[in-house]
């Protein structure tokens, strides 16, 4: 990709490429949205794109932008990156489909009237040969968002914060029933708004949409869904812990798993995360089983017919990776530390070759045999993995190197934080039930971002409480992955549902935004952790 023009400042590749007929198709994203938190940065100019690369020579065949270089009158729109989606290709119509993210910035003159070519938060159809855009879902929803839109950051680069409702899910192609016995080609994808959209693949017309849970900047449907062609399997993240009702009448304020009828959008089943935790990663489907992980360190196998838990396994770290299934084995990375528990484990499990019975049964187990590897886990593999081989290998490989999934997952989190401060606060002795270390991630006039890592001692813990005292009038304005209470300068933070359980020597993290007096942002001298 080019460097030096306005199309590629801080460009990154966070989504998976797809290969077809000698060509690699790769989406392009940018870290510019996080640079916007710096008040001296002139935000923003990046434009998302899809690039077609000759697989044999590396030559660029075409590059298609999701936004024009500038609008009428010189207006500059930015963003609409292709960050979390693996392209899907329909040879019959010579079309490639991708999903896009929000605008990083828009001209103030366009806030009330967005142009139709502003292909943000969209499903976009492009000509496979030329890259020309055939259609996009685009407006009408306003969505300008970058890192400066977070509470506590200077608003210079975010005058009108939007909801940050990207379409980060990889697109899926379907053959749906049409009128008079015909078949209708369709394309669908999930959105961080909590909606799944099914569109006519030729025209982009909406066939149906379904809301499966509350939306937010972290989902909604944040990463990949999976499908068997008849059903769409999803995770509703509900990162904002908003109360919502499941089809069975149960009200929850955490994550859920479910399935939609691909033809109608009807929710076939939806079940709560079994331990009240948060699940933001992609889903994998094979042989009548849905595999999904959670930030509370658990991995689950669900009956694809009714959501019943068939098997569960507690890893040593948070699971935000979609497992890959190859040769009758399931490979699963573990240890996503942003808002979760760090770990460097990689697991291999045998996969059952027969679909489970659709009728409820008393928790049958596929009898997985985990084989943790001491090497760090690779970047998570996303979206629906192919159906496993019906002839599984007799024993797990001690050093698995799975073939990549056709729909690989993006590297976790499109919203990286600024560089961390090198000076963590002192922690209590590791002989205690838990310890905590405090650091400043970044700071600016009147505000800063902090992070605290909680580490369990030589035994697992089920809950934790961290305490410290600010020395110079600092005050927390927002917190995530924890609940805070204050009394004067004293701060007490307790775990939330998804990160209270920490395995032996494992870690979890919470973060916060805070104000300060712009004089001295002193790191607390004593940060303590206790566990009941």
Image (tube, rainbow, N blue to C red):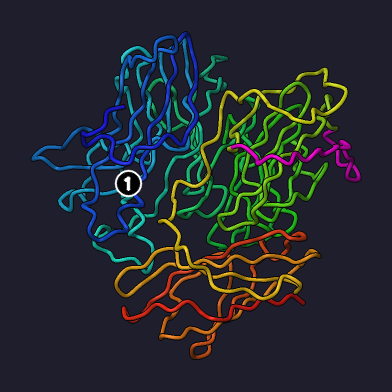
Name the one closer to the observer, 324 or 311.
Answer: 324
Q: Quadrant of the C terminus?
A: bottom right
Name the one closer to the observer, 416 or 121.
Answer: 416
- Relative to 99, is 317 on the left or the right? right
**Which range of residues does the magenta coloring cover?**
357-378
Q: Is residue 173 above or below residue 442?
A: above
Q: Quadrant of the N terminus?
A: top left
Q: Is residue 474 above or below residue 336?
A: below
Q: Name, please, the residue furthest toward the left.
A: 73
- Relative to 11, is 3 on the left or the right? left
Q: Is residue 88 above or below residue 236?
A: above
Measured from the top left, where is residue 406 in percent x and y?
A: 58, 23
Q: Is residue 319 magenta?
A: no
Quadrant of res 157: bottom left
Measured from the top left, where is residue 258 in percent x and y?
A: 66, 43
Q: Name, please, the residue furthest toward the bottom.
A: 488
Taken as a whole, is the magenta stretch helix, strand or loop? loop
Q: Residues within 10 Å of mark 1 (few under 14, many from 20)?
A: many
Q: Residue at x 45, y 54 (%)?
A: 217
Name the one closer to the observer, 234 or 199.
Answer: 234
Q: Residue at x 64, y 37 (%)?
A: 322
Q: Which secondary structure, mark 1? A: helix
Q: Residue at x 50, y 44 (%)?
A: 195
Measured from the top left, where is residue 308 in percent x and y?
A: 79, 44
Q: Which residue is mark 1?
A: 32
Quadrant of res 360: top right
Measured from the top left, where is residue 492 in percent x and y?
A: 59, 81
Q: Is residue 372 magenta?
A: yes
């Amino acid at each position: 990709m080019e460097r030096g023009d306005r199309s590629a400042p801080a460009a990154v590749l966070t989504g998976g490429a797809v290969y077809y007929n000698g060509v690699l198709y790769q989406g392009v994203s940018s870290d510019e949205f996080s640079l916007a938190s710096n008040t001296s940065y002139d935000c923003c100019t990046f434009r998302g794109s899809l690039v077609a690369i000759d697989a044999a020579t590396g030559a660029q065949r075409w590059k298609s932008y999701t936004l024009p270089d500038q609008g009428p009158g010189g207006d500059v729109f930015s963003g609409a990156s292709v960050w979390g989606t693996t392209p899907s290709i329909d040879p019959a119509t010579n079309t490639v489909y991708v999903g896009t993210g929000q605008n990083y910035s828009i001209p103030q003159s366009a806030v009330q009237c967005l142009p139709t070519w502003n292909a943000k938060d969209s499903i976009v159809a492009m000509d496979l040969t030329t890259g020309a855009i055939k259609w996009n879902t685009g407006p009408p929803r306003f969505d300008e968002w970058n890192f400066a839109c977070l509470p506590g950051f200077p608003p210079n680069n975010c005058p009108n914060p939007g909801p940050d409702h990207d379409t980060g899910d990889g697109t899926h192609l379907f053959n749906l029933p049409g009128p008079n016995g015909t078949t209708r080609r369709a394309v669908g994808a999930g959105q961080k708004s909590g909606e799944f959209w099914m569109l006519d693949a030729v025209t982009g017309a909406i066939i149906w949409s379904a809301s499966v849970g509350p939306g937010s900047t972290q989902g909604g449907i944040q990463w990949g869904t999976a499908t068997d062609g008849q059903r769409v399997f999803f995770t509703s993240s509900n990162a904002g812990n908003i109360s919502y009702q499941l089809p069975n009448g149960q009200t929850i304020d955490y994550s859920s798993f479910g399935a939609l009828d691909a033809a109608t959008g009807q929710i076939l089943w939806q079940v709560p995360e079994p331990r009240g935790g948060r699940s933001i990663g992609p889903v994998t489907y094979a042989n009548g089983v849905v595999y999904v992980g959670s930030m509370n360190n658990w991995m689950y196998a669900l009956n694809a017919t009714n959501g019943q838990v068939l098997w569960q396994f507690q890893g040593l770290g948070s699971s935000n990776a979609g497992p890959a299934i190859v040769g009758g084995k399931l490979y699963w990375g573990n240890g996503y530390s942003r808002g979760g528990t760090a770990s460097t484990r990689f697991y291999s499990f045998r996969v059952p070759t027969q679909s489970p019975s659709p009728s409820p049964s008393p928790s049958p187990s596929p009898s997985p045999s985990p084989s943790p590897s001491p090497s760090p886990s690779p970047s998570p593999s996303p979206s629906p993995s192919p159906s496993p081989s019906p002839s599984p290998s007799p024993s797990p490989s001690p050093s698995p190197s799975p073939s990549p999934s056709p729909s690989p997952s993006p590297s976790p989190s499109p919203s990286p934080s600024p560089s961390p401060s090198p000076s963590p606060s002192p922690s209590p002795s590791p002989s205690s039930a838990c310890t905590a270390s405090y650091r400043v991630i970044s700071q600016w006039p009147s505000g800063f971002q902090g992070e605290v890592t909680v580490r369990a001692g030589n035994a697992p813990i089920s809950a934790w409480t961290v305490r410290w005292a600010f020395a110079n009038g600092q005050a927390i304005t927002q917190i995530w992955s924890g609940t805070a209470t204050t009394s004067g300068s004293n701060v007490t933070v307790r775990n939330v549902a998804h990160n209270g359980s920490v395995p032996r020597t494992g870690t979890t993290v919470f973060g916060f935004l805070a104000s300060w007096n712009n004089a001295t942002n002193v790191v607390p001298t004593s940060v303590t952790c206790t566990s009941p």
